[in-house]
Image: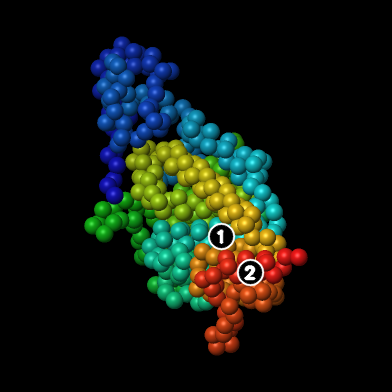
Amino acid sequence: MRIPIMPPRLQDLLGETQTPERMAALLSRLPDIGTPHDYLHWDKLQHYSPPEGLSVREWWLLLKLSRSDALRPIGLTDRQGRPFRFAVPERVAAELHRIDLGMSGALDVPEPILNPQTRDRYRVASLMEESITSSQLEGAVTTREVARDMIRSGRKPRDNSERMILNNFNTMQRIRELKGEPLTPERVFEIHRWVTEDTLEEGSAAGRLRQPDERRVVADDYGTLYHEPPAAEELPGRLAALCDFANGVTPDGFVHPAVRAILLHFWLAYDHPFVDGNGRTARALFYWAMLHSGYWLFEFVSISAILRKAPAQYSRSFLYTETDDNDLTYFLLAQTEVIRKAMRELQDYIARKTSEVREVEQHLRALELFNHRQVALIRHAMKHPGHRYTFTSHQKSHAVAYQTARTDLLDLAARGILEPRKKGRQAIFVSPPDVPDRLLSLEKSESP
């Protein structure tokens, strides 16, 4: 990925204005100035045709002047002490309104999430997806199916990639328990330890700030430097400031809770306070902030699944911010778009799963013999002949007690839906290739 072209400096643009009359003429056009496709960085804007009567550089000057009045600081500064600032353009405001309605449960909450019988299954599925894709963003190499099987079965991770995924899954579970608590440096260290447990080359680096001799930069394989974080000596004070921001102590005035969560994500990623695991920790803090602010439906949303589809856009939003006077609006625009897509995927996923359940139920009255957990397993078994289920995998998939999971599977085996086997001392239940036929036979045998 290339570094964006640096915008012209404001001082240089002002110096290029030939006369006071020309400056007055330019300023008279400020109320009507606009940007195609919203908040463009100079890297893209320079390729557009400017409004009539303006050069591209004059156009950029007017855009910078029009944006500057709306920008607000958040307490974060760069390595040179210059503040990061943000604005809330109309497109971001519209997305924030959708987040308020869609993620706080104020409107149109899908019935399967409201239903206590099914909500745990959707939450676990979302946690798995976020855990897997967040780790893949950081270099984990494995398939979704293998990763899900590891989590469900409870088996130990076989390599560093699987360990990263399991750590993320456990961390996301714990984040739910912390949502009512304030954020402290000690809590950030604890979250980092959860995320990086047994994955760092130097185990002692988990849960502590990087040290002066642990200089970390973000660069590609060819040596291109994308980001150099603040010096290690500054990190304790910067982390304390991050927590003040996360807890709403700073800055003065109202900051929308979702904006605060997004900027908290950027803040930790920018400071890069740890030897490794910064991205995963930043995304975990984002989830904490959203749940802390009452957006409880974020338990069911995976942002990393969206980020992984377009990682360059994710990285570019960081670079746009750093190369254009620390303007965080670029990151806000990118992340609210990610949230919008994640919300849409959740709605589509639930609609798809609900449709599948109804389709099966319409054709097989035999499913009335089973509870909702067994119905979910039967649907999975019909699509995955030969799949193996255990008491532990069923327990984890539905967040139920071990004895409940045991009763479910033994009942399915007793009714002939699953084939029971043994692997050593462990009970295993295999999906046969003719599950639909077995259901039909069961339906006929149960008919009066």
Instruction: Tell which of 351 and 285 is nearer to you.
Output: 351
Which SS class for mark 1? helix
Disc 1 packing (10 Å; few <14; some 14–19; many ≥20) = some
Q: Please, which residue is most extreme toward the left here? A: 222
Q: Amino acid at mark 1?
A: Ala
Instruction: Tell which of 20 and 46 is nearer to you.
Output: 46
Residue 241 shows up from this direction: no
Image height of 123 relative to 34, above or below = below
Quadrant in the rendering for residue 396: bottom right
Count of numbered circles on the image: 2
Q: CA distance from mark 2 to mark 1?
A: 31 Å
Which SS class for mark 2? helix
Of the numbered discs 2 and 1, the one sitting upstream in the chain is: 1
Q: Is residue 246 left or right of residue 448?
A: left
Disc 2 packing (10 Å; few <14; some 14–19; many ≥20) = some
Quadrant in the rendering for residue 105: top right
Q: Position of residue 349 (x, y in %)?
A: 54, 51
Image height of 36 relative to 291, above or below = above
Q: Which residue is mark 1?
A: 125
Q: Which mark is residue 441?
A: 2
The structure residue drawn at horizontal position 54% and vertical position 70%, both measured from the top left corner, is: 434
Q: Please, which residue is most extreme toward the bottom here? A: 424
Instruction: Tell which of 384 and 164 is nearer to you.
Output: 384
Instruction: Tell which of 15 and 7 is nearer to you.
Output: 7
